Image (cartoon, grey):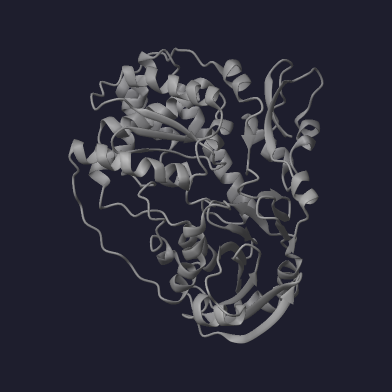
Amino acid sequence: MSAGRASLRRGLATCLLATAVALGGAGCSTTLLSPEDESRIGREQHPRIIEEFGGAYPDRSLQAYVAGIGAVLAAGSGWSGGPLTFTVLNSPTVNAFALPGGYVYVTRGLLALADSEAELAGVIGHEIGHVVARHGAQQHGRSVIVGLGSAILGAAIGDRAAEGLMTLGVPILRRYSREQEFEADQLGLGYMTRAGYHPEAMATFLGRLRDKSLLEAELMGTAADPDENSLAATHPRTVDRVHEARATALGGGPARGRIERDAYLRRLDGMLYGDSPEQGLVRGQRFVHPALGFEFTVPPGFVLANSQGAVIARAPAGALILFDTTPAGTWASMLDYVRGQWGAALPLADLTSLVIGGMEAATGAARIATAREPFDLRLLALRGDGGRIHRFLFATPAQDTAMLTESLQRTGFSFRRLSASEAAAERPYRLRISEARPGDTVAALAQRMPEGPRREARFRVLNGLAPGQEPAPGRLLKHIGF
């Protein structure tokens, strides 16, 4: 959760509550942009994209490296709409997308998942394909902008109509059609081949993405993709479809080309991994925000995930904790705020004022009906420092509320301010690259992964190691450290 995302945070939980009590849809229309409109939209939206995704990653060498790969691919694309702009976003989410007008983005989370320069080139080539084919112009006005809050709440309460209701205000993540994805794959494969890369890398990266999505879904206790802002959500493709695109684009001959694995991984050594201190850090069951100076702990069994707009913790049974921070405004008391602003659309009961960690707080509860089952919502607002309100939204299936009440109360009461020395002691994770030594095993190496469940599985996904596969001596491996 970024310290600078006030406008996004301000509306997130309020819109979530409105979504919970008044599900609806939005109309859409279809327009086709002119090349001039595409360029204008790209120029206007580029700064907003940078802001929404935590800024550009502050490593000029890495930015230049990615831009260089993009330039080589673009040179063989036939694009005549002006220079393409390539940006590495400072986001741990695995994502890549393009704006109309030639703006292409990849996240550092995607760089960490990719295993070679060829895999990265496959992703960038695919996005250039969307630009060249003007898929963004075709989608404009018709696509549904992905809203993180509605997707998370919809997944939690089993009401998929909630998805698509919220917007982040920036048309950044679009679901392309199967035909558009297939065309972007064909074009991207052609660009890769002309640049000398092995075309199979496009499919191997997609397999890596699939494995990561499956593991995260398992950890989150859902069969759905747990990250609705991910590349898997916005680019619905399969390995088989990529192979089909390769056969169509390149014929049935043997695939050849360079991979550049070791050189690529060595460039990533020391790159920020996961959240940054400015966004807050997930540490097992604990969320700590050094920049804003607070921390809290979620119950065992909940899986924590951080985003630009909110912190989400989810239990396999469907219970959800959603946390954000918003400007306090002029509310005289937290009780007035919960009753008159945040929970105004809900049939609130049990309205109570309290004090948590020396901070004024207030709470209220409501039961809502969903398409699947009734859910209980508990709102908790705390007046923080610097004119901020910290907010917890607890959502539980009604049948589980009594069982979870005590542990969720402990989460609310665990919220506390950090001292300056405590905040300074929190450090972000870094991606570290080293060679496997003789006798190294995944079981032993995985113990160096950050705390949390399924360490061995997370290590295998990070390094592209199949179940039962052990690293060969000398193979470069990714580790997570400081």
Horizontal side of residue 74 vs 373, given as left or right: left
Taking 171 as reference, is 253 above or below it? above
Q: Residue at x 58, y 52 (%)?
A: 3
Q: Position of residue 150 (x, y in %)?
A: 46, 62
Q: Position of residue 8 (x, y in %)?
A: 47, 58
Horizontal side of residue 266 vs 31, given as left or right: right
Quadrant occupied by the C terminus? top right
Q: Position of residue 145 (x, y in %)?
A: 37, 53
- The reply to whether residue 88 is in sight is yes
The quadrant holding residue 366 is bottom right
Q: Position of residue 41 (x, y in %)?
A: 28, 43
- The reply to whether residue 178 is in sight is no
Q: Residue at x 45, y 34 (%)?
A: 239
The quadrant holding residue 300 is bottom right
Q: Residue at x 68, y 34 (%)?
A: 430
Q: Residue 293 versus residue 93: which sits nearer the camera? A: 293
Q: Residue 305 versus residue 50: which sits nearer the camera? A: 50
Q: Residue 401 versus residue 62: which sits nearer the camera? A: 62
Taking 28 as reference, is 42 above or below it? above
Horizontal side of residue 296 vs 194, given as left or right: right
Horizontal side of residue 194 vs 205, given as left or right: left
